[in-house]
């Protein structure tokens, strides 16, 4: 009985709970009264706020794809140009090896020290003044106005990025003359910096074994301010020679090599020859101490030139142009090595390895200006002539008493001039209407007449006169202030001990 009552009570309790829940549900479903509806209806303003925001229109897939492609293009071009710049930077090791190999062992430390510190000096000078003077707004405050020097953008001030695919369309900023290149500003700066360092390094070889270390440093710093960037502005900064004469130098036969060569020649003349070089009225050979070092240095330079010339395209593009430039560069170097060997064999009676190495470098210098404007067959002709020129030039400079221990003036000056002339002779087509940057007119041998050749000769003359005059003034001021040449006894002992207090090859001799 008790159990039945308990079950009945539990049943009634569960029924009540279910009724309660069902009642709540029915109450929510019951239509609200008019007053309740009014209270529940939001105000018009509130309704507007409550309305969900309209979805933004979908992005244009073509525009998105183009933006992505531009970023990838800039990235790829930047990696390419930077890598080429790294190769050009490594050429400093090549110059150091070639110069020290062609010099006597007692001057090895001095030559290596000069080739090492020159890039540090040039980095400072080019950053502070050189970059702005070379690529900044012209003296009319307009970028690339055909002027004489850059007057804006010193020390990267106001140096916003001016690459077409990065900056606002049409923006040029302070460096409009180089705005055609589609890589970031810092990429352009670094690539031009390593070129500037190369120009100063050329000077080192011609004044080797007799110049004071600190005097060389002073000259190189000044060179980065008043020589290299000024003449560079006339050409690569779209200054007077580029704008008024359509002068063209693709990768630096004049801008880099001739400028360095003119400064080197002037320094060698003012310094005078090494002791004993022209004693008794004849040319006395002073052999270098390591052809192994010279050989390795030449190979490094040959490799570096594949950054020097193709990198000057400043973009990968479809690969056709950089491949053409690379093949032309290699062809000129190879054939020049052969013709210089043959010429030395005929003139000297032996296939002198020093002439072979310098012949290869001469071919590289000569093809630097026309590398992008000519074809493979013409490159072979240019290289063949360069190889002969360098041998005859080395002998000619010795005949007139200009002592250049490594042949820097013959390699860089003589063949820099020759290569620049080749633009007016071997340019295979009229490139003056090429989009963005233009180009030279067809050369004399390809139906273009003498117009481009005359422009090249004018540029060679102007750059030569300016560089010789300014460098002579700088050399002479240094000579009569802090001194230019080491003492005779120091030169005889060797600059390693006299200038640096150590030797490259210590051996077992105790120095007192």
Image (spheres, helix red, strand yellow):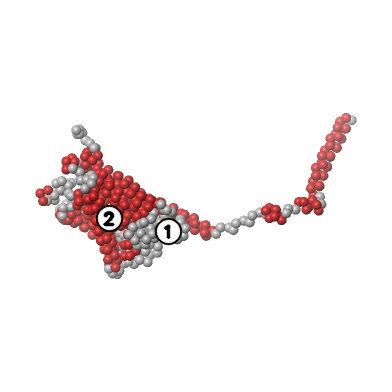
In space, the residues marked 2 and 1 are separated at their CA atoms by 28 Å
Q: Where is residue 419 in the image (x, y as percent from the top left)?
A: 27, 59
Count neighbours of disc 1 (C-alpha within 10 A) and say few if under 14, some if 14 to 19, many if 20 or more: many
Q: Name the residue under label 1.
A: 172
Q: Position of residue 305 (x, y in %)?
A: 31, 53
For the question of whether residue 374 can be seen, the reply is: no
Q: Residue at x 79, y 49 (%)?
A: 29
Q: Where is residue 156 in the image (x, y as percent from the top left)?
A: 39, 51
Q: Quadrant for the N terminus, please.
A: top right
Q: Do the residues labelled 2 and 1 touch (CB within 8 Å)?
A: no
Tell which tag, 2 or 1, sits nearer the viewer.
1
Q: Residue at x 82, y 38 (%)?
A: 14
Instruction: Name the foreground residue: 266 vs 407.
Output: 266
Residue at the right extreme, as displayed: 1
Q: Position of residue 281 (x, y in %)?
A: 11, 51
Q: Residue at x 15, y 54 (%)?
A: 399
Q: Quadrant for the C terminus, please.
A: top left
Count neighbours of disc 2 (C-alpha within 10 A) and say few if under 14, some if 14 to 19, many if 20 or more: many
Give the SS element for disc 1.
Answer: loop
Q: Tell me if residue 453 comes above or below residue 102 in the rendering.
A: below
Q: Which mark is first along the chain, 1 or 2?
A: 1
Q: Which residue is drawn at 24% across and 39% down?
A: 500
Residue at the front extreme, as displayed: 481
Instruction: Name the foreground residue: 418 vs 184.
Output: 184
Q: Mark 2 points at which residue?
A: 259
Image quadrant of residue 505?
A: top left
């Amino acid at each position: 009985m008790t159990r039945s009552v308990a079950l009945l009570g539990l049943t009634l309790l569960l029924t009540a709970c279910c009724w309660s829940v069902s009642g709540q549900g029915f109450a929510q479903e019951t239509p609200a009264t008019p007053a309740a509806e009014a209270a529940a209806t939001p105000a018009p303003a509130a309704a507007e706020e409550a309305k969900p925001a309209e979805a933004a229109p979908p992005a244009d897939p073509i525009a998105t794809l183009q933006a992505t492609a531009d970023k990838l293009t800039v990235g790829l071009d930047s990696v390419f140009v930077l890598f080429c710049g790294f190769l050009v930077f490594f050429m400093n090791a090549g110059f150091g090896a070639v110069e020290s190999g062609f010099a006597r062992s007692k001057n090895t430390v001095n030559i290596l020290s000069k080739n090492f510190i020159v890039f540090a000096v040039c980095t400072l000078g080019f950053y502070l003044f050189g970059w702005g003077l070379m690529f900044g707004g012209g003296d009319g405050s307009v970028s690339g106005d055909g002027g004489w020097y850059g007057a804006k953008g010193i020390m990267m001030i106001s140096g916003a990025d001016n690459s077409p695919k990065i900056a606002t369309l049409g923006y040029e900023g302070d460096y409009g003359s180089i705005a055609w290149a589609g890589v970031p500003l810092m990429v352009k700066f670094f690539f031009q910096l390593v070129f500037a360092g190369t120009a100063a390094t050329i000077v080192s070889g011609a004044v080797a074994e007799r110049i004071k270390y600190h005097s060389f440093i002073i000259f190189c710093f000044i060179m980065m301010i008043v020589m290299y960037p000024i003449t560079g502005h006339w050409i690569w900064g779209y200054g007077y020679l580029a704008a008024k004469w359509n002068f063209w130098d693709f990768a630096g036969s004049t801008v880099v090599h001739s400028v360095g060569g003119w400064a080197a020649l002037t320094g060698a003349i003012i310094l005078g020859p090494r002791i004993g070089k022209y004693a008794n009225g004849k040319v006395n050979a002073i052999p270098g101490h390591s052809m192994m070092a010279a050989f390795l240095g030449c190979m490094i330079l040959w490799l570096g030139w594949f950054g020097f010339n193709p990198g000057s395209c400043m973009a990968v593009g479809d690969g056709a142009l950089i491949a053409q430039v690379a093949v032309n560069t290699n062809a000129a170097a190879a054939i020049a090595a052969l013709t210089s060997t043959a010429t030395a064999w005929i003139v000297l009676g032996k296939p002198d390895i020093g002439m072979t190495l310098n012949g290869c470098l001469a071919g590289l210098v000569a093809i630097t200006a026309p590398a992008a404007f000519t074809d493979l067959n013409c490159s072979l002709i240019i290289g063949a002539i360069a190889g002969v020129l360098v041998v005859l030039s080395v002998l000619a400079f010795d005949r007139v008493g200009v002592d250049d221990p490594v042949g820097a003036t013959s390699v860089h000056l003589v063949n820099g001039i020759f290569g620049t002339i080749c633009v007016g002779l071997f340019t295979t087509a009229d490139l003056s209407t090429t989009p963005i940057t233009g180009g030279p007119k067809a050369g004399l041998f390809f139906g273009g007449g003498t117009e481009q050749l005359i422009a090249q000769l004018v540029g060679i003359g102007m750059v030569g006169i300016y560089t010789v005059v300014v460098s002579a003034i700088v050399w002479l001021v240094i000579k009569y202030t802090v001194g230019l040449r080491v003492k005779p006894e120091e030169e005889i002992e060797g600059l390693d001990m006299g200038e640096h207090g150590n030797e490259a090859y210590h051996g077992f001799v105790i120095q007192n």
